[in-house]
Image (tube, helix red, strand yellow):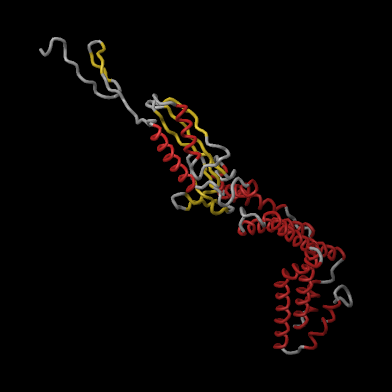
Amino acid sequence: MFGGGVVPALDAGLLGVGETVTTDRGRAIVSVAALAVAVLTAFLARRGRDLLAERLRPAVADVAIPFGVITVFATAVTVILDAWGLSNDVLDAIGEPSGAQLGQLMVTGIVVVGGYVVTSAIRRLLDDLIGRSDAVTDHQREVTYRLSQLVVWILAGISVLGVWQVNLEGLLIGAGFLGIVVGMAARQTLGALLAGFVLMLSRPFEIGDWIEIGPDGQEGIVKDITMMNTRIQTFDGEYVMVPNDVIGSQSLTNRSRKGRLRLEVEVGVDYDADVDRAVELADDAVGDIEESLDVPSPETVVKRFADSSVVLGVRFWIDNPSARRRWRARTAAISEVKDAFDEAGITIPFPQRTVGGRVDGGRDSQVGGETPIAESPPGGDE
């Protein structure tokens, strides 16, 4: 027995509950009431922390609220033990704690409260840094917070075990082997998870951006970004889930990042046409369409000599790029250039091939991939 020792409240019976309540029904009611008060306190702790943070400081609320919850739970346990007359039995089983044990208990309490404070600070940091960003959903922010919380409590647990002088060597060795096994079994999943964190930090694209993955990969509008994959909607209306590690290992084109996009339409003109006049007409025609920007202005360049024409590249810019605006602008540009060339009498030739034949050493040879016309031998038919 403590005899007025460390916890006199338990030794003497807290408020005399055990002496006041003598029936089993009364003890059950007291126990349920004490437990309900503790659960209700824990339930209201978050709201109380918010109110206290508004009146004082968030750090003060982070420290005061967990101490209050721990105190209420300790009082509830004490009341329940005292109501059933188990206080003395518990103290006899525990024994008189030494000064070292009291220090360990204090350090344990400080570590637990410190873990709660750190996780609360991480929550506020996430809300302040990425809470207002449309690129990070509430789900992603919650997952990030839960992972951070897990790391903090693992470190806190290791610290508590170290305070109580528990041998962690075997535990750490087992955890190391377990980590190797899990890493080998789920290396693709872990790779996608790590790539998801990289995408969230580097932010090469956001929800609503028009992206293309790889030189000949998926192309569409980003609809959602999770820790494991990115969901895009293709221009065919299909939803495609692309693993984040696939995105991280390939080239990525973001057509929406600059807010504008350059388009190019190729058109060929006849070799007999005035190329300078064709360039001028193409610039004027593209500049008149609704989607074309004035700055940068449209530009037409001579690109190459083709088999049947001189190829021109008609270049112009559109803003707020999307698949619908791109195809609408291309269609309008082709139509306007065609009409301008028709009015000016500039011919847009189609591929042509001249078929002929020749005699090489008395034998007919094939030209242009077609069968040549047979020639009659001198002197007529034999």
Position of the N terminus by quadrant: bottom right
Spot the residue most to the right.
4
Residue at x 45% of width, y 52% of height: 238
Residue 97 drawn at (x, y percent): 84, 69
Residue 54 drawn at (x, y percent): 78, 66
Residue 252 or residue 228, whichever sits in front: 252
- Image quadrant assignment for residue 293: top right
Residue 181 visible (yes or no): no
Spot the residue most to the left.
382
Q: Is residue 233 above or below residue 306?
A: below
Residue 229 or residue 83, whichever sits in front: 229
Q: In this view, does 371 lie above or below 338?
A: above
Whether residue 41 sits left or right of residue 308 in the image: it is right
Whether residue 177 sits left or right of residue 116 in the image: it is left
- Image quadrant assignment for residue 63: bottom right
Whether residue 270 sits left or right of residue 65 in the image: it is left
Residue 85 visible (yes or no): yes
Residue 311 drawn at (x, y percent): 43, 29
Spot the residue most to the bottom.
23
Position of the C terminus by quadrant: top left
Q: Is residue 349 above or below residue 357?
A: below
Residue 370 drawn at (x, y percent): 26, 24
Whether residue 290 sits left or right of residue 367 in the image: it is right
- Give the tally of numbered discs: 0
- Image quadrant assignment for residue 261: top right
Spot the residue most to the front.
343
Residue 133 or residue 193, whichever sits in front: 133
Residue at x 24% of width, y 13% of height: 359
